[in-house]
Image: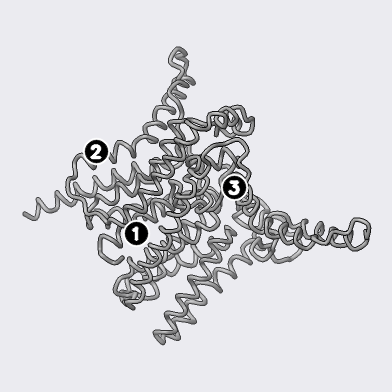
Amino acid sequence: MKKLTNFYSYNNFFIILFICIIIWGSLGTKYIPFSELNLLNKDYSSILYDIKIIINNLRYFAPLGLVILLYFLKKKIKYSFVFDFITFTIFFTFLVGSYNLYYFNQNLIDLFTSNNLLIITGYTPKFIRDIMMCFYFIFAYLVLRILDKNELYLFIKISFGFLIFSSLLTLMYAYREYITNLKEYLYFTQFLINGELFGVPSIRSLGLSRNLFIIIIPISLYYFFSKEKKFKILFLLAIIFLSFNIFQLQSRTSLYSYYMYCFIIIAVLFFNKSYKEIVKSLFILILIPQILNITVPITKKYLINNTLEFKFPNSRISTMMPNNPSLSKKIDQMKMDNVDDEKFYDENIDKKINYLVVSEYTSGRVNLWRKTLEIFELKKNHKFDFLGFGPAADRYFLKETVSNSFFYSLISGGILGLVFTVIFHFYVTINLCKFLLQKKKISEDILSYSLIFIIFYILLRGLVESSFVMYGIDNIILFQSIVYLKKFKIT
């Protein structure tokens, strides 16, 4: 009997591992039409290119095959009607938006297809890709909701392993460049801007900082609240290393969230009257990583070029103009010119300057959000805009991602998409708050508390990134966390 149990455990592990590989392996892939295969040209480079296209498309369509296979093999599924209804409605609005674009706004398709910038970036309309983007939003959820409790728990552990592996691999390549240049922070390394790993774009600095923060949450909760003493030294070193790199990557969303998380940890320790642990947490979570964050760039510069003068590194976090420091001089000049030139005095100069500062501080996001609203307000040459235009619409209209989950849902799924994304946030937040009001000790359920912090963080990221409404790490991590909590009747 024991042998049969062990066989089942190993067999189950490999099945879940296979599912994880398909889901995580599909990240970063782009649909390439099979018409681009060089079947008539049999030289070596053409054969390699054909193989690359075939492998890429297999990875791209694999999640669809996985969903069909699982629902064919599995019969019993426990439904959460309310959450299902909200999630499937968001998916449905994206699908309707794509239908609206391709069948009622053919003039827009012609316009986007001939746009030079979209041609260069490879984001001209492709019907199959856009429809698949609708399904990609819901793929991970469809897979996860069919797994039982033990399978889901195993999936989360393997996913966490994938997250650690991919993040450490990216950090390794980034540091190979960082130690040889004069850049102050890891944020400025080119590998985190345009690097590739295994033919897929590497994780960018914003995504890497998100990964590190997600990784640090369960590790730090275990270190500060678990009664077990195993591997505590390793967890301590891991916390310092991860938090130091979060500072180095200079992502304001992750850093502000990290400070909020540290404040919550300290507040809980204070409530538990663990005053020694409060001092320890301040050193481990903030002081030591920040000291390293300041001294490492200075030391590196001194070792590479000891003629450099001592100075503190210029942080993107401490300035209102992180991407354009010279803008402050331009603003001062605008104020002076407005005061000196009485003939062309502009009474609204302060409003214009404030908008300029806010736009710069948000890295142009405010301007993107304004343009998104204009699409629905101006109604120049499109029909049924209240239905949205599908999940690639921000690329078509704005030439880049809209960087906000609510605006993304608006442009993709129209008014209904926006409404149900708001409902999604409220529903998840209310259910998590109900659990927190139970005042269950963190030490009794570290995994659940870790997932709750992660969910809140991803929802918060939705204010400045498209986040979980697009298929990616946010999408997978969020849905696995929510489904786990529901399976164990926590939400």
Q: Is residue 424 above or below residue 122?
A: below
As drawn, which residue projects farthest toward the top? 40
Q: Residues within 10 Å of mark 1 (few under 14, many from 20)?
A: many
What is the CA distance from the residue labelled 2 to the residue labelled 3? Answer: 39 Å
x then y, percent, for residue 395: 56, 40
Q: Quadrant of residue 355?
A: bottom right
Give left or right: position of 99 versus 72. right
* Dot placed on the residue nearer the N-terminal end, 2 or 3: 2
User: What residue did someone put label 3 on?
Assistant: 372
Give left or right: position of 19 versus 37. left
Q: Quadrant of residue 304?
A: bottom right
- Write the residue at 77% across / 56% down: 327
Quarter of the picture holding the N terminus = bottom left
User: What residue did someone put label 1 on?
Assistant: 482
Q: Residues within 10 Å of mark 3 (few under 14, many from 20)?
A: many
x then y, percent, for residue 316: 66, 60
* Dot placed on the residue nearer the N-terminal end, 1 or 2: 2
Name the amino acid, label 2: Leu
* Dot placed on the residue nearer the N-terminal end, 3 or 1: 3
Name the amino acid, label 3: Thr
User: What residue did someone put label 2 on?
Assistant: 69
Q: Is residue 368 above or below residue 282?
A: above
Element type at marker 1?
helix
